[in-house]
Image: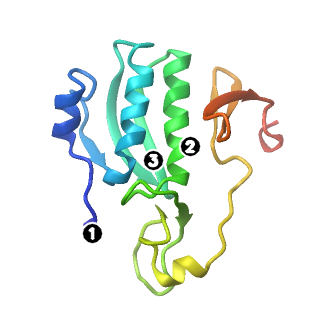
Amino acid sequence: MRDFPTIKLADLQEDYPGVFDSAKWVDVGVGWLGLVRDFINEALPLDPSLAVHELKEKWGSLRIWADTEVLGARLAKGKAEAKSAYVCEVCGADGWIRRPPPGGGYAWWRCLCDEHASPAQRTWGTRRRPTDGMMQFEGQWYRYERDRDEMIAVDTPERFR
């Protein structure tokens, strides 16, 4: 059970007819609504048959399950997922992926701003993995470049060579 508002599937279906018709699961906070809208607005003109099946959080960032083989639409998906690691899922402010508080029992990793993170979460350091914000499509690797707000082609990461 979420203790913050989530995006409603019915709202997405109304705003984007046809795109979310087959969606079964939308379970992310309203703080990521802008990212979802940006993805659809960027991808849909490139692939009018775009179909989104699921939106969920995994290890603190957004995951989008969508059918498209169009490179530009795939890059828009990768960009939205990568950007979610910098955006509070609750409110949309700048955030960091935070682990669950120690002794808190069963809890999810979340991308949270300082206001929505627990006091314990705010004291832990923040770090990113070398492959965060990366994706592969048809053998080519791409990395989200935050300063340029785009996915750029890069060499295959060392660990995947």
Residue in front for this viewpoint, 140 or 124: 124
Residue 62 circle label? 3
Q: Which quadrant: the C terminus?
A: top right
Q: Which residue does the image show at 68% across and 40% down from the upper left?
A: 147
Label 1 amino acid?
Answer: Asp
Of the pair 61 and 96, the residue shown nearer to us: 96
Residue designated by label 2: 82
Left or right, 87 with respect to 10, comes to: right
37 vs 63: above or below: above
Q: Amino acid at mark 3?
A: Leu
Q: Position of residue 99 (x, y in %)?
A: 53, 71
Question: Residue 153 got which mark?
Answer: none
Q: Does the image show residue 28? A: no
Question: What whole-number distance in Å separates the C-alpha atoms at marks 3 and 1?
Answer: 18 Å
Residue type for callout 2: Ala
Pick the front one: 55 or 125: 125
- Give the CA separation, mark 1 to mark 2: 24 Å
Residue at position x 60%, y 81% from top?
A: 123
For the N terminus, the image quarter is: bottom left
Residue sitting at 27 percent across and 43 percent down?
25
